[in-house]
Amino acid sequence: MTEAQAPARRTVVGTTLETHIFEGMLDSPGATGELTALLNAISVAVRIIHSRVRAAGLAGMFGYTGETNVQGEEVQKLDEYANDVLCTVLERSGHCAILASEELEKPLACNPNAKYMVVFDPLDGSSNIDVNVSIGTIFGILRVPAGGPSDTALLQPGSAFVAAGYAVYGSATTLVLSTGRGVHEFTLDLNVGEFFLSRADIRCPARGALYSINEGNYSKWTPEVQAWNQYVKSDDKARGLPMGHRYVGSLVADAHRTLIKGGIFAYPADTKSRDGKLRLLYEAHPMAFVIEKAGGSAIDGKNRILDIVPSHPHSRVPLIFGSTEDVAVYRQYVSGQRT
Ligand code: AMP
Ligand code: P6P
């Protein structure tokens, strides 16, 4: 058919997550398809969790199971369900050698011959489940090191991640993914049951107008964090202050807003959570990987999150991330360079 005869091709179909993942494989010479299969398995698990989260009230999935998890937190039915879904889907994929979950005291050995390890928080934001506030799933993928899969093999810096991302079960269900080549957002089309590209190559603004922290912890913070907090609330229009305050209390929701709009999220150490509250391996590392691939920064107050090696699968860490300029100001206060 000559060019003149070729029908004008209209783009009537968006880019699905599956297509995006497949294109990533095509751009990776020698790729066998194992990572592709693993990423698609995670997409299936997120859609299954989405369907249950949406119907949680009707399905009687609110409330607690009566057990407590390794964190000493009461396990809510949806936490347990989301964890079971991810463990089952990843095991059945055959491409996960071992997995670590917030809901499992010990990592779960899967296929010892697989190339990848997966870490995840199956349902982040549990305290918001019963009141219909956004919650999510956070995940990261590591390669099995030369010594083979083991609990200690999981204890790598976040810079070793092959891919990371998160899902937000909110007014829409979105999945944000980075395999190291940019950060991309996909939104679930409920009628089709597929994720479609909704934001490509997301960049976190160099500076933002919002700060996100649990102000109720003010009295527990160090004097340096308190000084930073007073700064962002000071009335100084020339410096674009005060910043606006937003805090959902679900890391995925606060992180997604910070990624898109810029600004800063902070969960510092305090007198109650001396190592911080958030977990390094399956919360801070994945979020730091995504935010850095979008041009933002992520620190524990002084050190780069992606450089920190967990001492055990449930290590906690202070987590501050967002726009590079806003994170730099925080770091200046915490290191005493600014008062
Ligand atoms: P594989 O042979 O599938 O385990 O892939 C080998 C390496 O190629 C991975 O560790 C990635 O660095 C890259 N790669 C493979 N598939 C993809 C993909 N779908 N998206 C991005 N990178 C990929
Ligand atoms: P706080 C939710 O329970 C969570 O683990 C994160 O999703 C969230 O960022 C944080 O805890 C909220 O903690 O102490 O402010 O309620």
Image (spheres, helix red, strand yellow):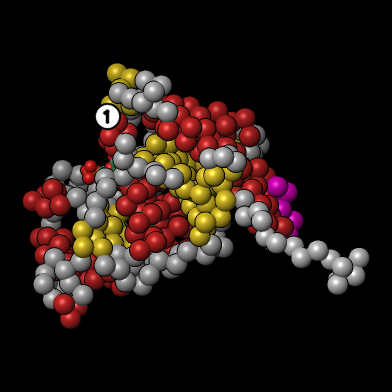
Residue at 19 percent across and 50 percent down: it is 214
Callout 1 environment at 10 Å: few (<14), some (14 to 19), or many (20+)? few
Q: Is residue 155 visible?
A: no
Which stretch appears magenta? Answer: 29-33
Residue 53 x, y percent position in the rendering: 42, 32
Q: Is residue 161 above or below residue 191?
A: below
Residue placed under numbered mark 1 in the picture: 72
Q: Which image quadrant shows ligand 2?
A: top left
Q: Nearer the viewer, residue 72 or 7?
A: 7
Q: Nearer the viewer, residue 61 or 172?
A: 172
The quarter of the displayed image where residue 95 is located: top right
Residue 30 x, y percent position in the rendering: 74, 56
Left or right of 313? Residue 215 is left
Magenta region, main secondary structure: loop
Left or right of 72? Residue 288 is right
Residue 200 x, y percent position in the rendering: 53, 62
